[in-house]
Image: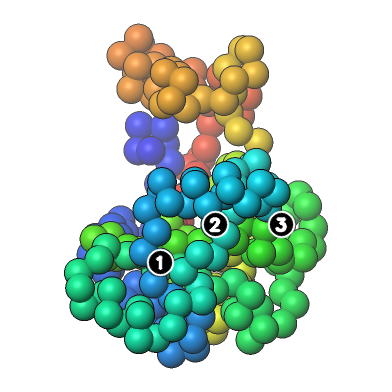
């Protein structure tokens, strides 16, 4: 970022230093009764979805978690946790929406958007060995840093439905969002590691200057740009 002339205000935030904040958020959600432990392996979920035949699918075409562990009673949950079974903590989206009622969020390009977190199903918010998920971490971090405009790629547009629900449950102010077009190569393929796309490091090594990079993006050189959150 510094090489491109992009500055930031305040210290760099690392999620590994903020585990206590995510724990507090999970405890708050647990008190609301919207968390449940899920003991399903990925294989079990795939089998259940295959057997269901007409399982609902999310915005990106992936099958939505079918709620296998949602109906487990308290005693069975406790017994399996005490037995040391690995588990994830999932958000009971239907129960959460009963508490919050209808929600909306605002995107600079799309305008007012009705929140539909049910499209993504009961997402994982934490695992026994991983104390937070992307959904939980960014929601808490944006609020704690006072971010009022979240700027990110349009591939994360649908995730915002979940983030809006978490904000309502945790009593956090909802920022505005700007989901921008993804940077693509000359063939229209998004730049991503999975595609072995050109990186900023390779551009620098090939002698490209920061001004060159901004011109490749079709953008003016920042003077200076500021990245927050």
Q: Residue furthest front?
A: 51
Using the rendered image of the protein, determine whether residue 137 is visible from the camera's viewpoint: no
57 in relation to 169, above or below? above
Seen from the viewer's position, the closer of residues 8 and 18 is 18
Q: Which residue lies furthest to the top in this view?
A: 206
> What is the quadrant of residue 78 in the picture?
bottom left
Q: Name the residue under label 1.
A: 38
Point out the tag, 3 or 2, that comes first from the N-terminus.
2
What percent of the width, then of the height, locates residue 43?
41, 46
Q: Mark 2 points at which residue?
A: 65
Point out the frontmost of discs 3 and 2: 2
Residue found at x 59% / y 72%: 93
Mark 1 and mark 3: span between their CA atoms? 32 Å
Point out the tag, 2 or 1, that comes first from the N-terminus.
1
In the rendering, which numbered label is found on residue 107?
A: 3
156 in relation to 75, above or below? above
């Amino acid at each position: 970022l510094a090489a491109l002339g992009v500055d930031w205000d305040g210290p760099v935030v690392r999620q590994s230093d903020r585990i206590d904040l995510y724990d507090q958020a999970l405890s708050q959600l647990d008190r609301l009764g919207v968390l449940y432990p899920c003991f399903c392996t990925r294989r079990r979920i795939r089998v259940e979805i295959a057997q269901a035949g007409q399982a609902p699918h999310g915005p990106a075409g992936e099958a939505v978690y079918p709620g296998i562990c949602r109906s487990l009673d308290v005693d069975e949950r406790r017994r399996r946790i005490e037995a040391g079974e690995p588990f994830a903590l999932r958000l009971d989206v239907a129960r959460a929406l009963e508490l919050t009622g209808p929600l909306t969020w605002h995107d600079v390009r799309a305008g007012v958007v009705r929140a539909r977190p049910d499209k993504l199903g009961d997402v994982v918010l934490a695992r026994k060995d991983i104390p937070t998920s992307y959904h939980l971490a960014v929601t808490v971090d944006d609020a704690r840093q006072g971010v009022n405009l979240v700027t990110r790629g349009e591939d994360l547009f649908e995730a915002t439905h979940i983030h809006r629900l978490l904000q309502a449950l945790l009593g956090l102010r909802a920022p505005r969002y700007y989901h921008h077009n993804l940077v693509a190569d000359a063939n229209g393929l998004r730049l991503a590691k999975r595609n072995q796309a050109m990186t900023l490091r390779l551009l620098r090594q090939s002698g490209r200057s920061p001004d060159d990079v901004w011109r490749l993006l079709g953008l003016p050189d920042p003077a200076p740009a500021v990245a927050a959150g």
